[in-house]
Each structure stands twice: as C-alpha cells, then as structure tokens.
Amino acid sequence: MKRVLQFWRMPWSALFGACVGVLMVLSTPEIVTDIRGVYDKFRPVLKMSGTVVSRDEDSVTLHITGEKLRGEECRLLSVFGYSVDKDGRLFDALAERIDRTATRRVREQGNYDIGLWRVKPITPDAVGVQVVAQHDCVGRVVLTVMAEARL
C-alpha cells in the first residue's frame, strides 16, 4: 500500500520513467543494427579483388584473390553476382566458380586465391560486375562485396 501511495505522490516521474523504458525497448534494435553496420563497414569479412580474365556477350570471368579478415566465426552461406550498368544499377546474375568445385569449407583468416568465377548473365549495357559473399557471423548475416570489376 505504501508503494501505491508513493506512486500517486509523483505520477509524472513514474510516467516519465515508463516512457523512457518504452523508448529504449523500441530504439535499441535500431541502434544496435546501426552500430553493427558501421563495424561491418570498417571490418568486413573479406577484402578481395577480381581481375577480368575474359568476357563474352553474356558473361565475364574473374580471377579472385584476397584476404579473409574474420575467422571461423563467419561461415560462407552463398555467393551471388550482379551486372552493373552505367547508372550504377545492379541486375541479378549468377556467380559460380568454374576452375573447380567450390568446397564451402570453413576458412581461417588469411590470404587466399579462390580461383576463377563466372558472372552471368550480364546486361548488354553493363560497365561492371560484382561478386558478393553472404556469411553467417555468429547468427548474423553479413554481405561483403568480394570482387568488383569494370568492363
């Protein structure tokens, strides 16, 4: 009973506290997402690059090499590609390893030559291609541009 009386003596303080609590519950996921986004930008899973090996009317072959910056905590889920037009718009494409079968094994941090990758189809007006890796980093999906090449 004493607690109820204390509440009624200072209802605005209690209401203010309840509002702050609700705002914290609603805003925390967004704040955490923004912080993780900044972390992923400054510490990506991969830092790789691709060199154009060949090109035909509907595909581009890239040789991709570089470094994996995060270790076993980031496991590869998938790899996909994009065709990029002169306005920077992205068009879905398939990115597949063509020099041998991709093993999808867990890799430690370090430098890797991950071979030849074909991106197809590319649009007729494409000026570039991208290969993007999707990793599961301890339950959180992280996308990293693995290779980007101008045509």
Image (tube, rainbow, N blue to C red):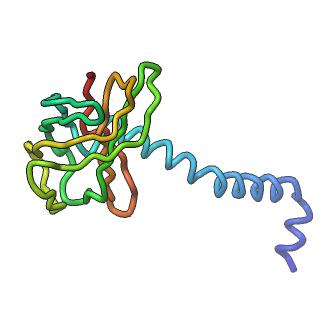
Residue closest to the eye, 126 or 56: 56
Task: Determine whether 58 is above or below 22 in the image.
Answer: above
Image point (19%, 32%), residue name: 49
Q: Quick one: quadrant of the C terminus?
A: top left
30 lies left or right of 92: right
Numbered disc total: 0
Image point (17%, 28%), residue name: 52
Residue 103, picture quadrant: bottom left
42 lies left or right of 19: left
134 lies left or right of 102: right
Residue 66, picture quadrant: top left
Q: Residue furthest top?
A: 86
Point out residue 65 in the picture as x, y percentages from the top left corner. 12, 38
Task: Determine whether 83 is above or below 26 in the image.
Answer: above
Image point (43%, 42%), residue name: 37
Point out residue 36 in the picture as x, y percentages from the top left corner. 42, 46
Q: Residue furthest front?
A: 57
Image point (30%, 41%), residue name: 120
Residue closest to the eye, 97 or 121: 121
129 lies left or right of 68: right
Q: Quick one: quadrant of the N terminus?
A: bottom right
Task: Determine whether 148 is above or below 142 in the image.
Answer: above
Task: Determine whether 32 is above or below 65 in the image.
Answer: below
Point out residue 94 in the picture as x, y percentages from the top left corner. 32, 47
Point out residue 86 in the picture as x, y percentages from the top left corner. 42, 19
Residue closest to the eye, 66 or 140: 66
